[in-house]
Image (tube, grey):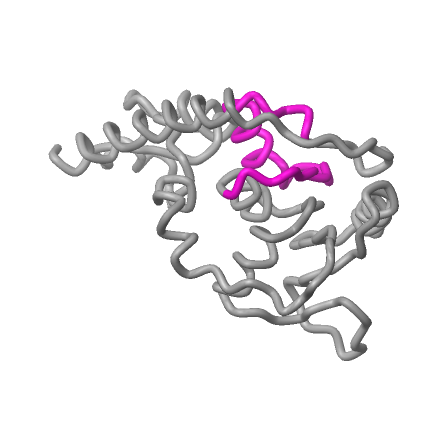
Amino acid sequence: MNLRNLNNFNAISVRETTLADLLQPLTSKKIETVLDPTLLANTDIWNSIVKRPLLNCKYVLVYQVRFDKNTRRIAQDIANQIGAKVIEITAWINWKFKKNVYQCCSPEEFLGWIKYASCIVTTSFHGTAFSVIFNKPFYCVKLGKGDTRAASLLHELGLENRMIEKTSSPNFRSIDYRQATMNLADLQNKSYQYLVSSLNL
């Protein structure tokens, strides 16, 4: 798309502040930052479709969209700290099957793996988002340019310390979600208002 055509839109919104800052000089229209749709839905909606894993033990979940071997190392360190096993769900298919690695799961199962985990270690924005939705302890591993959306969300929620370097070895800490929940409610309200007003233009 020719970026000069941005002015042809009635309203423009993006999901991360860094992208809004990048695009704003290219148009006279105000570019708003709104939440990802997964975070706009009421948590009850997600809870209504969750499928609990058939696993009767404590586990640390690894979910990688962008692969880095350190992610599993970090998860294993945390699992050792809390007496858990490591379970991984992948975003790709590998011809070689590994123990405790699930190469495919339904949306309901995906949500269940996150909801019932003792901790999540992820390189994925949506792995991060659903960890927040279910108020789970998590660590988002920084891998570079693709981190901007997760970094923007965590900054807005006041959870920046849950984004860690891939070389780090964090001590497990739970999360007090009280302030983050209030921040999320404010962001939801702002996003709702913007979307409704945009649809009425």
Residue 157 counted in the magenta span: yes
At 29% from the left and 20% from the top, the residue drawn is 28
At 83% from the left and 48% from the top, the residue drawn is 83
Residue at the limit of the structure toward the bottom, as seen here: 95
Please indicate whether residue 19 sits to the left or right of residue 164 in the image: left
Camera-side residue of 123 and 181: 181
Bounds of the magenta span? 134-162
Quadrant that contains the C terminus: top left
Camera-side residue of 192 and 152: 192
Please indicate whether residue 52 sits to the left or right of residue 77 in the image: left
- Picture coordinates of residue 142 (x, y %)? 72, 37
- Picture coordinates of residue 73 (x, y %)? 86, 48
Q: Quadrant of residue 102?
A: bottom right
At 60% from the left and 65% from the top, the residue drawn is 53
Please indicate whether residue 77 sits to the left or right of residue 93 in the image: right
Please indicate whether residue 58 sits to the left or right of residue 22 in the image: right
Camera-side residue of 168 and 133: 133
Q: Quadrant of residue 112?
A: bottom right
Rendered view: 192 above or below 126: above
Residue 16 counted in the magenta span: no
